Amino acid sequence: MLQDLTKIQAFLAHVHPYDSLTEAELAALAGRVERVEIAAGETIYALGETLRGVYVIAAGEVAIADETGAQISHLGVRNSFGERGLARDGLAVTTATGASDAELLVVPVEVYHELIEAHPAIAKFFDRSRGSDIRKTDLATARISELMTRQVLGITADATIERAAHLMHSKRVSSLAVMEGGRLAGILTVRDMTRVVADGIATERPVSELMARDPITLSPDALGSDVLHTMLERRIGHLPITDKGALVGIVTQTDLIRFQALSSAQLVHDIVYAKTPSEIALVTKRLPELLAQLVGAGNPHEVVTRLITDIADAATRRLLTLAEESLGPPPVPYLWLACGSQGRQEQTGVSDQDNCLIIDDAMTPGMDAYFKALATFVCDGLNEAGYVYCPGDMMATADRWRQPLRVWKSYFQKWIAKPDNEAQMLASVMFDLRGIGGEQSLFEDLQEATLKAASANSIFVTHMIANSLKHTPPLGMFRGFATIKSGEHKNQLDLKHNGVVPVVDLGRVYALQARLTAVNTRARLEAAKENGVISTSGAADLLDAYDLIAESRLQHQARQVRAGEKPDNYMSPTSLSDFERSHLRDAFVVIRTMQSAVGSGRGAVT
């Protein structure tokens, strides 16, 4: 037992983060902590109570339970608890009970705050967010709103070409926004002007005859890399930025020079100009190097996975183009969609392919031969590029997943009406659909109608919630983690199925409950917070937990790449420091708490 200050000081010297203190600082801390003895079954604090401070277990074991009474963690010697409540409003967010007779040290609230203020290492340990992280800012992390020119020079559609030329020359701009009835109707660039001389177009003609009509646009909250990738794929140099249909700015290639993220942009460029699937495969072989580079630069996980997914999107669209060049134009419009991690824009260094085709209802049975050939070409090309065939055959090459729109509508109607196990699994996958190439309108109405019907069916929602709880975080009764018990990955954590996937499943349920059209998990969590599906504090905890797990997964894969190994999702807890294990365990606890809340019908936890 720690009955004198010398023993308390010696103990704290081996407990992170206090091991970063000097001997004098440890001696001072030992004199201010409180020593508490508790009996097995005794409540240390209950949910909602004011906390005395941060607790450190000196001997014995402590059980932590959520608001439903379900045990979410079993802690042992040198583990800390109580800090989550202190970081918020000083009230306990869990209930702590002695799992055995135990001896605890309590760092009082005022001492806790003094330590955080005076010692960055301790502040970093107790800061479960990424707000204090230093991030590298480049095109990958910059928002378009930071890159665009807000003062856009415009001209009406009925103005003459001569007038446009004088305006561009006098204002020294390379483009004009062409407005019609107060909306953006087109864009006119210097390159368009060269056609006036080359094609002998009369300068008194209206600019509406020369402009690029209905140009592609992006929103201000898109990434700067989205601009560059779009420019490369579309072979354009000017991109209007609109917010809810209103023109708010423009980005040109010149704007991107100082921000240009050459690595990801270069891969997209090389894919766009690839002439065969084999050439595309040569480009995607560089993906592991890109992942390691992006992670090493300190980019947030959502930026890394977005850029990695951009490469898959570009490869898919290029393969669709090559397929059409080989097979001829499609007999009716179609839309190629991705689901799974590509659909959510969350691909890492380990990804298979999950895709399908929605075909216009004008399709006749005889047209399927064309679309089957197109699907085979693209799926084979993706496999060659490293996006291996889906083990579950969730690909457009399967007849079931290559159907007219009316059939897709019937699929979702059936899944929602009779949510058996297969229906739940398929609906979960298909709720992550995102159009990649083709006629996007084929999916827009289907997505809206499906979300409306699904959210209105309480039985379906209940089944989806139950399905979302099948993947649980790896929290063990002892030593913090429940690792894989046998096989190739014995004693390791599966950071995908037991780390990231539980949060992905929660995000999908929240999206269903609030009819949110976002597909990306982080975007779903943010939207769920904004729509009141989960509370602000619950969302903050879950986002922090998700960020930590997702970034731990990427860092693990980056280390494997740098070591010349093939990246995977399996990590040994012994490879982590006490600091990292503590934070990872807390992240898993948050997820289990949120799962308990949604499972008991209390999504908006406080």
Image: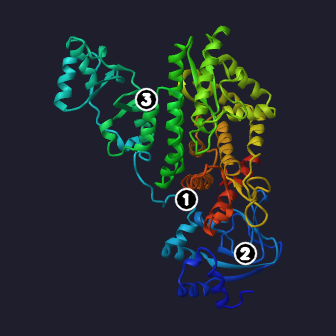
Label 1 crowd bin: few (<14), some (14–19), many (20+), radius 10 Å: some
Check the picture and name the quadrant holding the C terminus.
bottom right
- Type of residue at label 3? Tyr
Badge 3 vs badge 2, beta-carbon distance below 8 Å: no
Q: Earlier in the sequence, mark 1 or mark 3?
A: 1
Disc 1 marks a residue whose amino acid type is: Ser
Separation of residues labelled 3 and 2 (CA atoms): 59 Å
Of pointers 3 and 2, the one earlier in the residue sequence: 2
Q: Residue at x 76, y 55 (%)?
A: 484
Q: Does the residue at mark 2 contact the one at mark 1 (Cβ under 8 Å)?
A: no
Q: Is residue 231 visible from the viewing direction of this image?
A: yes
Residue 191 sits in quarter: top left
Task: Name the residue at 24% across, 20% down.
Answer: 194
The amino acid marked with disc number 2 is Val
Q: Which residue is mark 2?
A: 77
The secondary element bearing badge 3 is classed as: loop
Q: CA distance from mark 2 to mark 1?
A: 25 Å
In the figure, 75 relative to 440: above or below? Answer: below
Nearer to me, 282 or 453: 282
Work out how far the residue at label 1 is from the one at label 3, CA to CA, in angstroms. 41 Å
Question: Which one is in front in this view, the residue at disc 2 or the one at disc 1?
Answer: 2
